[in-house]
Image (tube, grey):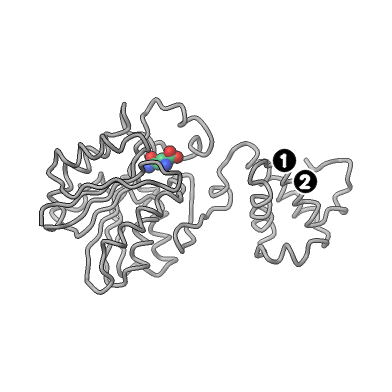
Amino acid sequence: MLDASMPPSDYTIATLLSRAATRLGVDGRTEAELLLTHALARPRAWLFAHADDPVADGDAEAFERLVQRRERGEPIAQILGHAGFWSLDLRITPDVLIPRPETELLVERALALLPIDRALRVADLGTGSGAIALAIASERPLAKVAAVDASAAALEVAQANVQALNLSARVRCVQGDWFAPLADERFDLIASNPPYVAQDDPHLREGDLRFEPMLALASGNDGLDAIRRIVRAATAHLHAGGWLLLEHGWQQGSAVRAILAESGFEDIVTEHDLEHRERMSRGRVRG
Ligand code: GLN
């Protein structure tokens, strides 16, 4: 409900924003702007140029409903229905993991291993919204990317993103469990941000994670089930000298390096995220 002490007609863009910002906490100002942008279907810059404009009651109420959803903890990306990743704006629904900045590190490292002037074959396992597959395809015009997900609902989101970004000639969405839908195809690079949280990790019941698909987050007692399956099957799907890149939990670096080594991967390297925590590892099959 709107604050009864203030007649709705007295709301301006500026007053609505500052009240919501206070209620929403740490990133409140930014989030309030994004939600108002969404409620009014106006670009963010428009809000600043019209700070003193009155807001129609219906619009103020629509905004209030969005603020309340955010107050209840719903992730901002799910409320807005989209999120930024790499240089792309991606459609997001509750069926997919919300792309995170640490996964941009994976994209950056993958690009460093993928020459721009060669026809390449890349796979993104557990593609979700299509984030990794689409970021790579957008930067490597000769690459063909297979975007795999076990969830049909997730793949629908990925497919919508492929189409919106005009990448359907080079990004193919396929449904199935890890390598299952890829038959005997081989790739130059396989990337994955698999589920890697331990299934009893209390974080799964906190913050944004509560609203995200469990299939994309949790993987067995130690969180490493998916990584073990991917690594063990990956050698049969990589060309000689091809790379496997995996995002993982910040305490899983040594375990993931051991899993890669057991399967015969070489040149194994772990890299840190922006918080200096071990966040992704890669290995290469013998060239
Ligand atoms: N990085 C996510 C988190 O812990 C987990 C993503 C994943 O399991 N792939 O918030």
Residue 155 coordinates in the image, percent (x, y): 36, 52
Q: Quadrant of ligand 1?
A: top left
Dividing the image into 4 quarters, which one contains the N terminus?
top right
- Label 1 CB sits under 8 Å from any ligand 1 atom: no
Whether residue 99 is visible to the viewer of this picture, yes or no, is no
Q: Amino acid at mark 1?
A: Arg
| Quadrant position of residue 204 | top left
User: Which residue: 27% across, 72% down?
Assistant: 142
Image position of 163 (left or right of 252): right
Q: Amino acid at mark 2?
A: Arg
Mark 1 — residue?
Answer: 23
User: Which residue: 15% across, 46% down?
Assistant: 265
Q: Secondary structure at mark 1?
A: helix
Residue 277 coordinates in the image, percent (x, y): 40, 41
- Label 2 CB sits under 8 Å from any ligand 1 atom: no
Spatial distance from mark 2 to mark 1, Cα to Cα? 7 Å
In this rendered view, identify the residue nearer to me: 47 or 94.
47
Q: Which residue is farthest front?
A: 276
Q: For the residues labelled 2 and 1, say whether their Cβ atoms are less than 8 Å apart.
A: yes
Image position of 257 (left or right of 39): left
Residue 19 coordinates in the image, percent (x, y): 77, 46
In this rendered view, identify the residue nearer to me: 157 or 191.
191
Mark 2 — residue?
Answer: 19
Categorize mark 1 by other alpha carbons within 10 Å: few (<14), some (14-19), many (20+).
some
Q: How many marks?
A: 2
User: Which residue: 27% across, 58% down?
Assistant: 146
Image position of 176 (left or right of 155): left
User: Which residue: 34% across, 51% down?
Assistant: 127
Residue 94 coordinates in the image, percent (x, y): 48, 44
Q: Secondary structure at mark 2?
A: helix
